Image: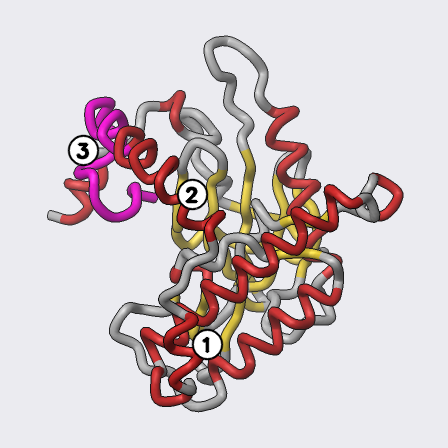
Amino acid sequence: MKNVEQRQHRPPAWLRAMGARELPPILIAGGCEYRHVRTFKHDFFAATGLYEGSKGKVVLKVMRRARLLGLPMDWLGGLLARHEVRLYRLTQAVEGVPRLIGPWGLTGFVHEFVEGRPLAKEDRPDDRFFPRLSAMLDEIHARKMAYVDLEKRENILLGTDGMPFLIDFQISWHVPLNRGGGTWMARLILGILQSSDRYHLLKHWRRHRPDQLETEKIADSYQAPFWIRWHRAVFRPLTRLRRQVLVWLGARSSTTGRSPG
């Protein structure tokens, strides 16, 4: 029944990163052949799938390749892929960031698969989880970047070893010094985004392991910075509208939850 429902609500081709095409059945990466196991997600911007081979499991992420209204979009996919590859490379020494295997084609890249699952609402991770996640953020921020997407619990993986992992650097922020990263505007934006990372970390920590937080920290977790309150006020109605439009187009089954993969 679930498979029938997913097929019924499959997004129209123009709303999918690869159009009517699917992820390739065979993937060659790092000198090894991998076979497609499943597709995690296929939306407007990217298609992501799991592959398995003699060297283990990997993830292929392909950014937008399909045309939109007859216009080529592979330039956008290439831009997004190069951005995310650059940030994976920047954070390879951070424990908890999947190992990057390398680019794939013009709009894709491959990284190792993390054995685990997205952090669930009812999870109560062990004592090491959030201190380690906090240390990960410190290491990421030390590289003059911000993760940005920590609000989404599904981007935080709970490894089978009980440790945290971060995936999806698609909208993470980093401006190299030779591109203006040292200007006052870039530093201001970086500071705001890093503060947002910290707020979202504290919010998840309070929801999952409040016993590890002092009373003051718990109180802070309820105090969203003004820019987050502004973002919610402006973009949440737009998000609800977007979801309703996708339901009308047959790309979603409802206005709640995430779109089908």
From the viewer's perspective, is the residue at label 3 or at label 2 nearer? 2
At horizontal 38% and vertical 74% (from top left) the residue drawn is 219
Q: Position of residue 7 (x, y in %)?
A: 22, 36
**N-term-proximal mark, 1 vs 2:** 1
Mostly what secondary structure, the magenta segment? loop
Numbered circle sitting on residue 230: 2
Mark positioned earlier in the residue sequence (3 or 1): 3
Q: Indicate whether 93 appears above or below 233.
A: below
Mark sitting on residue 30: none
Query: Of the residues tagged 3 and 1, which is closer to the observer?
Result: 1
Q: Secondary structure at mark 3?
A: helix
Does 173 lie within the magenta span? no
Q: Name the quarter where the C terminus is drawn.
A: top left
Which mark is on residue 8? 3
Taking the spot 27% from the left edge, 29% from the top edge, the residue there is: 241
Whether residue 39 is visible, yes or no, is: no
For image coordinates 41% across by 29% down, the residue present is: 16
Q: Which span is picked out in magenta?
A: 243-261
Characterize the local packing of mark 3: few (<14), some (14-19) or many (20 or more) Cα atoms within 10 angstroms: few
Farthest residue, direction top: 70
